[in-house]
Image (cartoon, helix red, strand yellow):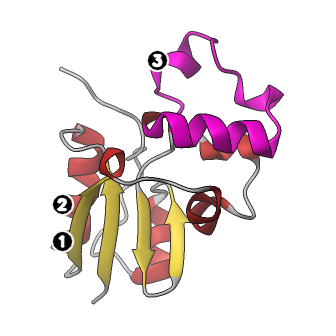
Amino acid sequence: MANITFFEKTGCSGNARQKALLIASGHQVQARDLRDRWWTNVGLLGFLSGLPVTQWFNANAPAIKSGEIVPEELDEFTALALLRDNPLLIRRPLMQVGDERRVGFDAQSVNTWIGLCDVPTDDLETCKHG
């Protein structure tokens, strides 16, 4: 069993499904709204380091979907500034267990990391509205 700090957008149905799976798998989840934290470059890079900039962003964010922000065109410094200024652009969830931090919820990767009771094959990062 892991004790997970889970940074989410409170009220997001996708984050609710992710948390439910973690809890059903016996983990303790301490949910935090990522909008309530003052993010720094160092704080964000603790979760994002090693990933391409394109994987730092929430693909479902309106500014991404509309093409207003194109992650493929951003350098690391500009991307971090955008994420700090608008945390809803951050790919969710951000998860921390001990000193290890992760971004996103690929069920197979989470299962390998901390274990899941069931590894769903559907995409748990995509928002499902309605």
Q: Which mark is residue 62?
A: 3
- Disc 2 residue type (three-letter): Ala
Look at discs 3 and 1 and give the one toward the viewer: 3
What residue would you read off at disc 1? 23
Kind of element beneath mark 3: helix
Rounded to the nearest angstrom, the CA distance separating label 3 from label 2 is 26 Å
Name which residue lies at 46% across and 27% down: 60
Rounded to the nearest angstrom, the CA distance separating label 2 from label 1 is 5 Å
- Disc 1 residue type (three-letter): Ile
What residue would you read off at disc 2? 20
Determine whether, in the image, residue 57 is placed left or right of residue 93: right
Magenta stretch: give its range: 58-87
- Residue 68 colored in magenta in the image: yes
Where does residue 123 sit, x and y in percent of width and height? 43, 44
Kind of element beneath mark 2: helix
Name the N-terminal-most of marks 3 and 1: 1
**In the rendered image, which quarter contains the N terminus?**
bottom left
Depth check, front residue: 62 or 37: 37
Determine whether, in the image, residue 118 is placed left or right of residue 88: left
- Disc 3 residue type (three-letter): Pro
Depth check, front residue: 83 or 1: 83
- Residue 92 colored in magenta in the image: no
Q: Residues within 10 Å of mark 1 (few under 14, many from 20)?
A: some
